[in-house]
Image (cartoon, helix red, strand yellow):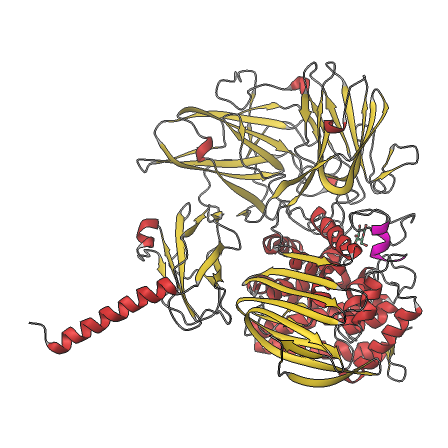
Amino acid sequence: MISQKKSFCLLLIFCLFLQEIIAKAEVPCQPIALKCEHLVNPIGVDAVQPRLSWQLNDSRSGAKQTAYQIFVGTDSLKLLKGQADVWNSGKVLSSSTLESYKGSDLKAFTKYYWKVEVWDKDGIRAKTSFITGFETGMKGMKNWKGSWISDSHDVTTKPAPYFRKTFSASKKILSARAYIAVAGLYELYLNGKKIGNHRLDPMYTRFDRRTLYVTHDVTSAMQDGINAVGVLLGNGWYNHQSTAVWYFDKAPWRGRPAFCMDIRIVYEDGSVETISSGKGWKTSLSPVVFNSIYTAEHYDARLEQPGWNTPKFEDSSWKDVIFRSAPSENIVAQLLHPIRDVEEIPVQKFNKITESNYVFDLGRNISGVSRIKVKGLPGTTIRLKHAERLMENGHVDLSNIDVHYRPTDDSDPFQTDIFILKGNSEETFTPKFNYKGFQYVEITADQPVELSKESLTGIFMHSDVPAAGEIKSSNQVVDKIWKATNNSYLSNLFGYPTDCPQREKNGWTGDAQIAIETGLYNFDGITIYEKWLADHRDEQQPNGVLPSIIPTGGWGYEWGNGPDWTSTIAIIPWNIYLFYGDKKLLADSYDNIKRYVDHITEISPSGLTTWGLGDWVPVKSKSPVELTSTAYYYADAGILAKAAKLLGKEADFVKYNKLALKIKDAFNAKYFNKETGLYGNGIQTELSVALFWGLVPDLYKNKVAENLAKRVEADNNHLDVGLLGTKAILNALSENGYADAAYKVASQETYPSWGWWIVNGATTLYENWPIDAKSDISRNHIMFGEIGAWFYKSLGGIKPDPDQPGFRNILLEPHFVQNLNHFEASHDGPEGKIVSSWTRENNVIQYKVVIPPNSTAKLRLILEKGRNVFENQKTISTENTLMKIQGTDNQVFTKTLSAGTYLFELKF
Ligand code: BGC
């Protein structure tokens, strides 16, 4: 007999259960966008504690998460029923949407499924997420079965090698994965088909310290019975045969490309078979008769061996492979957005000069390759010369980008592919192991060929990072500057950030620290930067010194590597923390930042440092190197102190805070004139760098900002800065009450300005302000690209809050600048889309804001006196203080916003 009390309890439990089911069904909240290691459904994950993240799909105002529970299991059906055989986090009272896996050790080669449940703003359990997964990879060196193999040729041999092997899959296949580590570049084929759509894999690293392997799901490429696997190896940065001023041909790691691969097949009966690289593989030279990541590729179609990567191919004339030592003892998973052929660009203009000489114009400057379709006589040699400029006579001009190239003969022309035809039917050629920077392609054939506009297509290649932001405005030039900035950013993202895609392809640190915010507002770049900071760790000397280009074959430890460039070690992890709310990169880089800062301290006991290049490629005035380098030293010490605090290293926090203060004092003692409120000679870079990096004592900020505004006005509202000044100038103005002045500079269309390039036809950013400059004249540099971030920060006013990073709290401070009637910025942050959009009509400003779920914003509006803030026709009560800007009174409204959509009207 059940007692009355017991049955009441059971009824209550049942009712609660029912209530929960009903509530759950009704709660309009569900976790979505699940990622592991910042990627969707990744395979080949080796992280010990993979990071799991999600967003809330909840459009209610004030939406937020009050708790979560993560379930990880190896059986998706069981997981569906809530049975997690691997890890159940239990209910965690937290609003965090980024957590590391904390279950028992993950096994190699295993598919893990996971889902997350959340409790909404009212503490009600919401709908569960869909189930997603991640799959582990090699998890260390001990699981590799294959051997490193290559052919017997040496580093000077030009043709790229083919490798092949056949094997029999004896039973029904459940799944198959290829794990391939390469010193050089590769394309992998199974049964005649190329595997995957990645390009230029694996990404460039310091091969003798860290070599990347890539995991491919090859299940669908496998067939019953006999299978053939084919590998084509390219040189990449591993065997740099072209000669240029950075001596990559002398890199310590250099060798004939080699690879190691395991194809792990799981049969339906549960048994596992691994097909590995080793003896038994055969090799032959391929029709890729020359390939250089730096210059171009040459292809002789007459040497094609049809079906070389299929089972039936007769390979008795092929040679045996040889064993090779591994390039490094550190073979790690490549887990990032890969390089892809992202966009096909049709030719805009076509010029037939003769029967055998044509010039194609893509109408825009890109990084990548061109694809040609052509029909001609056997042996016809076609040269495809890629350039950013045309000469007056209509031929392409390489003189702005071949200046650092040091060819030893004429067999390797710069940015010029060579394609030799098999003959008679239409043939297609696209290089596999090279990319270039170009807008124009000139084709010269040694026999007449008939080409049309459609014969050539441009292919924009870059690390395929998802877009994460958009700018739209009523000023077309602003919109074009934003697009050109993104084009240059992407043209310079190839698994590491570069300076330019043509002349150098170098991982110049200075350019990358300048562009980090532009990159992160516009693209989901964390995976690329985490990889690149690992490159930093590989390259750092024990004393903390970093080279100016990363990766490097050794060049750059002696030139250009002061704090104005190599502060990437601190600035990039700090920005990743701000944008993603993810501490991992900061924690991984902590000791490296510390060694770096300690080294500067050692060589700069006074607190001032002259180590650096200074304000590179300035318009006219040049500020002292000591001023700019010391500002970066100060920034690094500050980041280190903040990181110490975050990571619970209290003693370091105290020590580096003290150091930062010492640097600030030394800086101000030497450069600041309290009487005049000027730094140094009072030029734009001097004043704005001091303001932007926070070196100006609070008491004097207004005075210095006023001086900067006057300086800019005296410079006719045009730029007078170089690389370091462009990072600071617009921000220094708009953050200190002079947004209108900043916008004037940002939107100029006459020299020197970004708009000047645009009105002259630029589709990317240039390396120098004058278009007809004689040196430093690449047409695809990201180093002046901070303006792309400034649009978000100042006109849109969207900034991450260091106290609640990852846009958990948004610092929202738009500037409704004069002479611009509409502006909209949106950014996809970790919690969802943030929108800040304003329109001015008849002196009324409509301001629309979207704050994603699980976020808040601190809105701060600086408005003319008398302008009121209305929401739903009503004035809203805000904290309202007065602020003097340029001698006139302004009102500062502040209000805290929770998740939701808002429409404010700002009127008199
Ligand atoms: C690069 C720059 C780089 C600079 C260092 C140039 O050759 O292209 O972007 O930062 O050298 O001074």
Please report the residue visible at 45 percent of the width from the left and 33 percent of the height from the top. 220
- Above or below, comparing residue 523 to residue 447 in the picture: below
Segment colored magenta:
751-759
Q: Is residue 396 above or below residue 678?
A: above
Q: Residue furthest left?
A: 1
Say whether residue 195 is magenta: no
Tell whether 498 sits left or right of 213.
Answer: right
Indicate the quadrant containing the N terminus: top left, top right, bottom left or bottom right: bottom left
Instruction: Give the residue displayed 43% in from the left and 50% down from the top.
Output: 133
Q: Position of residue 895 (x, y in %)?
A: 62, 79
For the image shown, how many numbered marks are present on the structure? Answer: 0
Instruction: Residue 747: give x, y in percent of width and height.
Output: 82, 60
Which quarter of the figure is the C terminus placed in?
bottom right
Expressed as whole percent of the image width and height from the top left, the position of residue 334 reads 55, 47
Q: Looking at the rendering, which quadrant does residue 471 occupy?
A: bottom right
Residue 68 or residue 248, whichever sits in front? 68
Tell me the quarter of the picture where residue 812 sits: bottom right
Q: Is residue 276 above or below residue 609?
A: above
> Does residue 138 appear in the picture of this structure?
yes
**Does residue 725 sit above or below 328 in this rendering?**
below
**In this view of the protein, which residue sits in the foreground, 836 or 357?**
836
Q: Residue at x 67, y 76 (%)?
A: 860
> Residue 488, percent across and down?
74, 49
Answer whether residue 281 is visible to the viewer in this image: no
Magenta segment, prevailing SS (helix, strand or loop): helix
